Image (cartoon, rainbow, N blue to C red):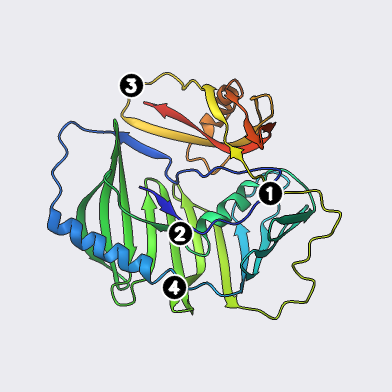
Amino acid sequence: MPIINRPMLLPLALVCVAGWAAAQTAILRPDGSPPEDPVLRAEAVRLLERANRVSIPAVWPANEMTLRFHVTSPAPGDPYDGEYVSSSGGAGLRRQHWHYGAYDHTLIRNGQRVSETGPRGLPTAAMTLLPQLAPIYLIRFDNQDVIRSIRDAAEDARCIQFDTISGDRLQPNEICVDPRNGWLLSVRTGDTLTRNSSFFPFQGAFFPGHIERWSAGRKVIEIEETLVPKNDYPEDYFTVPENSTIYICQQFRRAFEVNTPQPPAGSSIQINDIRLQGLIDASGRVIGLRPLDSARPDLNEEAVKLVSTWTYQPATCDGKPVIWGSTFTVEFKGR
């Protein structure tokens, strides 16, 4: 089930952060899954495609997006609240500012030139979620998704229940839409839930003014979002200093796995994915690991210890090895 979003720019010459799938839990696939009703699937696709259509403007003007976010249980040393502002002045002009505790970072892109101020390296786990959830979290069905039912729910919502089947995994999911306006109200994939509300218009589309992400029944983050057309920026707002030494990589090649063992399987049908954020250094070693939102925190330490042994052929920028930020998934089958 591919995920569609509008990613934020990260420090391009420093760290590239790979995407990660949302759900953390599934069960082993039973041998005899019921067949899918093609009429039911056509209706599910119609509902979801309408939700995607009303969530994407035909044209993106110069604009400014502000996200004020609250983390329910921040990591030790991190604050509860932060802010992210993304300013677009048109083609090739972008200014981003993150403020979250000690992390105060500004990134400016003007054509092929880039400058940044503030700390370098990976953003916190909370800030990693922002580009996934805003301006809106969208998905589409693919051939791994089997539609099971469509039901009317409370508060004027129609909800699509479907399974994602991949190999020996079966993951139950649900998407709820507003049948009158077409808004995407919620997406539940496994034990991960994204909720959208307080929709507002923007260039013929609609975006949520309030966004929540839940994991394993607990709220992880909530976001207040505004997005407005804007072209009255100060004259030097997107100016990159002449002495900036940061550049956009012209020929990037990602890191490749060399040795990435998974833990042995247990005896139950449960599958738990533990996601870690970290860096693959220029020698191919994994460093700086920290857990993301985990449904099974008791498995975090074991996952960190395992991934610390993984090795990669390092990423390259214009043929030279570079540090690459990534998310690593450890699959605990039967645990």
- Residue that numbered label 2 is attached to: 137
Q: CA distance from mark 4 to mark 2?
A: 17 Å
Question: Residue 268 appears at what percent x and percent y?
Answer: 32, 26
Q: CA distance from mark 3 to mark 1?
A: 48 Å
The secondary element bearing badge 1 is classed as: loop
In the figure, is residue 53 to the left or right of 279? left
Mark in front: 1 vs 2: 1
Instruction: Determine the image quadrant of residue 15.
Output: top right
Q: CA distance from mark 3 to mark 4?
A: 50 Å
Question: Looking at the image, is mark 3 or mark 4 earlier in the sequence?
Answer: 4
Task: In the rendered structure, find residue 58 and report the number of the disc placed on it.
Answer: 4
Question: Looking at the image, is mark 1 or mark 4 earlier in the sequence?
Answer: 4
- Residue that numbered label 1 is attached to: 248
Q: Nearer the viewer, residue 76 or 131?
A: 131
Question: Residue 115 appears at what percent x and percent y?
Answer: 77, 55
The secondary element bearing badge 2 is classed as: loop
Question: Looking at the image, is mark 3 or mark 1 earlier in the sequence?
Answer: 1
Q: Nearer the viewer, residue 32 or 258?
A: 258
* Three-letter residue code for mark 4: Ala
Question: Looking at the image, is mark 4 or mark 2 earlier in the sequence?
Answer: 4
In the figure, is residue 297 to the left or right of 168? right
The reply to whether discs 3 and 1 touch (Cβ–Cβ < 8 Å) is no
Mark in front: 3 vs 1: 1
Question: Looking at the image, is mark 3 or mark 2 earlier in the sequence?
Answer: 2
The reply to whether discs 3 and 2 touch (Cβ–Cβ < 8 Å) is no
Above or below, comparing residue 68 to residue 169 in the picture:
below
Tell me which residue sits at (50%, 64%) in the image: 211
Task: In the rendered structure, find residue 219 and report the number of the disc placed on it.
Answer: none
* Three-letter residue code for mark 1: Ile
* Three-letter residue code for mark 2: Tyr
Q: CA distance from mark 1 to mark 4?
A: 28 Å
Mark in front: 4 vs 2: 4
